[in-house]
Image: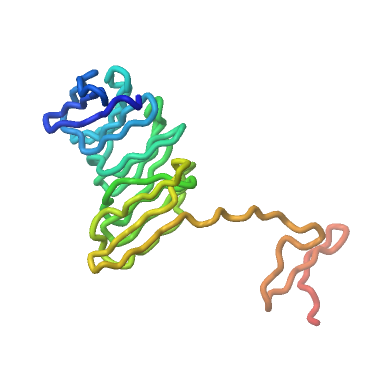
Amino acid sequence: GRGVVFVATGDGRVVALDRASGRTAWTARLPAPATALAAFGDRVYAGGGDDFLYCLAANRGRIEWRWRTGAPAAGAIAADARRVYFAALDNVVRALDRRHGDQAWKAPLAHRPVGGVFLGSGIVWAPTLGAEVAAFQASDGSAEGVSPLAGDPDGAPAPRESVRDTLDGLLAIAGDGHAQWLVPGPAPLPSKPVPGLPMFAPPPGIRRERQEPSGGTARPAPPR
């Protein structure tokens, strides 16, 4: 809840603290220290050092489910109403069902992730050590492209959220002082065929073949 703060300790505990008094509301113990931690609604998500992502009930710390990954999760974890998104050190971004932990999709990264993942405008952003930010559709994990950075980042790009809690973009600062602002691109416009126009026009130099009536054989069209 909003009156609770969640922290991870070096001995593998996840602790819920009352924001006003600092008293411990509950303590959960993981097999290995958490490498990433985030709370969304009534769930807390912890990337364990034992290569599992854990989902805990926010009100009492009970482990609801866990999902084995190829390496520890690292950096920021993102979530929406349906899924939780995270990057692991096996260079893979994964999307899991928030309630049950079933994997919805996974997508490879060309380089080691840095800073975790960020969600905005239906896009999952994944900064990497290759001086670039990869983007994926949150719905199915399809690649949206890679944005090169101005130089090697001085740290993980910082997200900036609007007053509506949606991601406006990422601010990246390179080691040489260059600043770069990355924003989601516009959604593609829907396309529909225009009535009366052919669906396909052959390239220049390619002639159509026509079908003879009454089941005759096809012959090349006569030259013009």
On screen, residue 223 versus residue 130, left or right, reads right
Please identify the quarter of the rendering in which residue 199 is found: bottom right
* Position in image of residue 45 (x %, y %): 30, 31
Between 122 and 111, the one lying in front of the other is 122
Residue sitting at x 21%, y 25%: 15
* Position in image of residue 153 (x %, y %): 26, 61
Residue at the limit of the structure toward the right, as seen here: 214
On screen, residue 59 versus residue 164, left or right, reads left
Residue sitting at x 27%, y 20%: 61
Between 222 and 202, the one lying in front of the other is 202
Between 110 and 123, the one lying in front of the other is 123
Residue sitting at x 29%, y 25%: 4
For residue 197, above or below residue 65: below
Q: Quadrant of the N terminus?
A: top left
Residue sitting at x 38%, y 43%: 106
Between 147 and 39, the one lying in front of the other is 39
Residue at the limit of the structure toward the left, as seen here: 11
On screen, residue 40 versus residue 188, left or right, reads left
